[in-house]
Image (tube, rainbow, N blue to C red):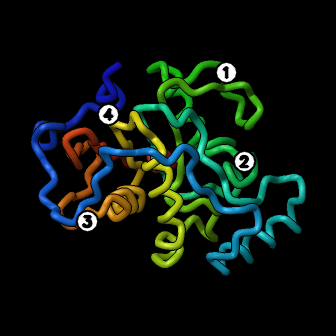
């Protein structure tokens, strides 16, 4: 399967055009952590997000209203990195990109290119299965206004780091939006200024790992 079928790269940003030049970049050639770390249901690393989560629990007790875990097999070659759960999307359903327009677009695309099986029905129990693909978010809890702060993104970075370290076959990261793009670069120890975000741009982060940029699904 060619991952570039999802987002054909531009002539100025091919997979082979850009090798990492950052000496401090982390070496992910050995990924041996079997299970990625994840925040607990009542994580308080980000007080503002915890308070917002609590308010949503009171207003909507039947919603998920907790940090949203990643979905898909750890053995996948493709990792899709989003920004954060949407308040009426993943925050409600408990599965990344499930329950709102962004999910409608993402899951229909994944199905078209063979990365999922089943019928997407905007619920976490719709039976959709993932094929060689995993989905995560740079920030695991829903932020007010869908706008996490820099400190909140940094607080969640260890979970993204653990996620990547646990994926032994990872070869492509699809970053949905500029914040996810920057989060991946910082997680891997790269300088953000060395890799400009652009829709459909591709960056070679290491000899075995590429990142493709896309506008976020909610913006398309």
Residue 112 image point, x, y percent? 48, 20
Disc 2 from disc 3: Cα separation:
30 Å
Which residue is tagged 1? Answer: 119
Which residue is tagged 4? Answer: 7
Disc 2 from disc 1: Cα separation:
17 Å
Residue 42 image point, x, y percent? 76, 68
Which residue is tagged 3? Answer: 192
Disc 3 from disc 1: Cα separation:
37 Å
Write the residue at 82% across / 53% down.
63
Question: Above or below — where is 116 with respect to 87?
Answer: above
Crowding around mark 3 (Cα neighbors within 10 Å: few <14, some 14 to 19, many 20+) is some
Crowding around mark 1 (Cα neighbors within 10 Å: few <14, some 14 to 19, many 20+) is few
Count the marks: 4
Q: Earlier in the sequence, mark 1 or mark 4?
A: 4
Disc 1 from disc 4: Cα separation:
23 Å
Is 90 displayed left or right of 170 in the figure? right
């Amino acid at each position: 399967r060619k991952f570039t079928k999802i987002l054909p790269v531009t002539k100025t940003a091919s997979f082979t055009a850009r090798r990492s030049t950052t000496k401090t970049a982390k070496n992910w050639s050995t990924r041996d952590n079997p299970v990625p770390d994840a925040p607990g249901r009542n994580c308080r690393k980000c007080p503002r997000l915890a308070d917002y989560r609590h308010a949503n629990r009171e207003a909507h007790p039947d919603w998920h209203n907790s940090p949203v875990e990643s979905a898909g097999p750890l053995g996948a070659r493709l990792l899709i990195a989003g920004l954060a759960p949407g308040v009426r999307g993943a925050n409600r359903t408990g599965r990344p990109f499930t329950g709102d327009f962004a999910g409608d677009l993402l899951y229909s695309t994944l199905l078209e290119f063979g990365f999922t099986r089943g019928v997407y029905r905007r619920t976490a129990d719709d039976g959709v299965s993932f094929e060689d693909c995993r989905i995560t978010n740079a920030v695991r809890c829903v932020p007010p206004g869908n706008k996490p702060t820099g400190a909140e993104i940094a607080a969640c970075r260890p979970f993204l780091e653990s996620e990547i370290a646990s994926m032994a076959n990872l070869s492509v990261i699809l970053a949905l939006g500029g914040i996810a793009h920057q989060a991946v670069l910082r997680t891997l120890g790269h300088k953000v200024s060395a890799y400009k975000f652009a829709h459909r741009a591709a960056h070679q982060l290491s000899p075995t790992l590429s990142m493709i940029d896309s506008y976020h699904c909610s913006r398309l």
